[in-house]
Image: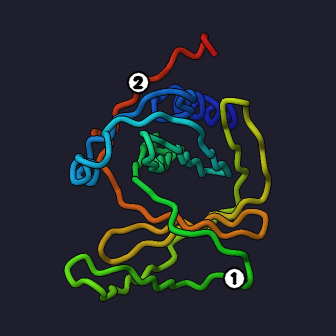
Amino acid sequence: MKLFKRKKEEEKIQRNELCDIPIGSMIELTDLTTFALEEEVAPTFELIEYKKYSADRFLRYMYHLVSNDDEVILGVDVDVALNEYNVARFIIDSEEEFTEPLGDTIVMEFEDPENSGETVSVRYERNNVVNTKMTIITSEGPEEYEDVEIQDYSAEDGSILMVELWDSIFTFFLGESMERSSVNVFPVDRKKD
């Protein structure tokens, strides 16, 4: 009986507009960061591909959005049990070859926006490590990869660091939380694909 209930919950989640958005859809971001960059960045982006990470009681989407020469990653974390969603805006900070495991704490240096030529240190503490199946969805279709590790870190200022370990490469995604109401999805008609 428990398996049927779980299947029903998963089907309910799949019908949400933030899950499996069709490639080519337009997504409007109305968060403060987009408005701060309004003169340089258009608020409407096209979805060109996305990654879907899934494991037991874990589901996350990382949507790759473009607008002219600008790119942003829209992260959607799905709480499968509660049918709740957390949304965040990411950029890819860097990619590095795996040489040794990451620690529970990562300290990153950033340019100080208030003092030219100086840096600010941000300390990120690890919250979670999950081994997932990653599905990459493009206009050509899906490709699946097993054993992709996701590590989640957070800082006192509320910023987020997500680290993906895949095929001996670390990818560092820097992000900040957004309100769900800051994301408007204009999906393309799936029947036309």
Q: Residue at x 69, y 82 (%)?
A: 101
Around disc 1, counting alpha carbons within 10 Å, would you say few (fewer than 14), some (14 to 19), or many (20 or more)? few
14 lies above or below 180: above
Q: Secondary structure at mark 2?
A: strand
- How many discs mark residues in the rendered view? 2
The amino acid sitting under disc 2 is Phe
Question: Residue 147's x, y, as percent?
Answer: 78, 59
Describe residue 69's horizontal placement relative to residue 104 as left or right.
left
Around disc 2, counting alpha carbons within 10 Å, would you say few (fewer than 14), some (14 to 19), or many (20 or more)? some
Q: Residue at x 47, y 46 (%)?
A: 76
Q: Nearer the viewer, mark 1 or mark 2?
A: 2
For the N terminus, the quadrant is top right
Task: Check disc 1 and report the residue beneath it.
Answer: 101
131 lies above or below 182: below
Q: Secondary structure at mark 1?
A: loop
Question: Residue 119's x, y, as percent?
Answer: 34, 86
Give the spatial CA distance, label 1 vs label 2.
Answer: 40 Å
Q: Hey, which quadrant is residue 33 in on the image?
A: bottom left
Task: Check disc 2 and report the residue beneath it.
Answer: 186
Q: Residue at x 66, y 35 (%)?
A: 138
Describe residue 95's horizontal placement relative to residue 65 as left or right.
right
Q: Hey, which quadrant is residue 44 in on the image?
A: top left
104 lies above or below 64: below
- The tag on residue 169 is none
Mark 1 and mark 2 lie on one chain; the one further toward the N terminus is 1
Q: Residue at x 22, y 54 (%)?
A: 36
117 lies above or below 90: below
For the C terminus, the quadrant is top right
The amino acid sitting under disc 1 is Pro
Question: Residue 106's x, y, as percent?
Answer: 51, 83
